[in-house]
Amino acid sequence: MAKALGVGGVFFKSPDPARLRAWYGQWLGIAADEHGAMFAPAAMPPDAVTVWSPFSATTDYFAPSQASFMINFVVDDLDGVLAQVREGGAQVVGAENYDYGRFGWFVDPDGNKVELWQPPVESPTK
C-alpha cells in the first residue's frame, strides 16, 4: 500500500500574508518568502517528530483562537521564544512541562493559537 511519509506543509489563509510572514520572521526567526519557509528534517532535534492529529470539532484546546487549526513549532529555547513573541505583541496564553518536553502557547497577530514544543535534552524512556 502506498502511504504518506510525513507532513509536507502547513497552508492557511491570512488577511495580510506579507505582514504575518514579516512578524514570524522578526519574532520566531522564520525566514520566509512569498512561497513560505522550509524546515529540513535534519534541522530538528534528535527524536523530534511531527504530529498529525485531528481533534473533535468541540475541542477548546485551540482557544482562545476561533480558528479550526493550530500550528506547532519545535523550538530550541521555549522561554526565549515566548519572551520574543510577547515583545512582538503576541498574547502568551500558557506554558507547561512534561517528561517529553516543554510546551508554550501564544496567539499570533491574526488570532491563531500557536503551540511551541521544546523537546527534552534526552528523550524519555520509551
Image (spheres, grey):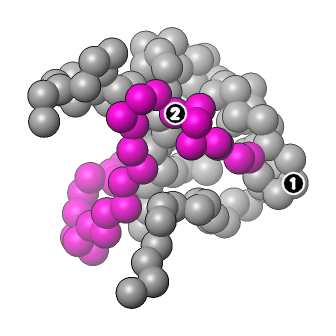
Look at label 1 and name its amino acid: Glu
**Residue at 22 percent of width and 30 percent of height:** 100
Which quadrant, please, contains the N terminus? bottom left
**Residue at 28 percent of width and 18 percent of height:** 122
Q: Is residue 121 left or right of residue 77?
A: left
**Residue at 58 percent of width and 36 percent of height:** 42
Depth check, mark 2 against mark 1: the one in front is: 2
Residue 68 percent location from the top left of the image: 42, 67
- Provide the residue designation for mark 2: 44
Q: CA distance from mark 2 to mark 1?
A: 23 Å
Is label 1 in a helix, a strand or a loop?
A: loop
Question: In the displayed image of the protein, which residue is found farthest to the left?
Answer: 125
Residue 38 is one of the magenta-drawn residues? yes
Residue 82 in sight:
no
Q: Main secondary structure of the magenta part?
A: loop
Residue 18 is one of the magenta-drawn residues? no
The picture quadrant where one finds residue 95 is: top left
Sequence order check, earlier mark of 2 and 1: 1
- Provide the residue designation for mark 1: 34
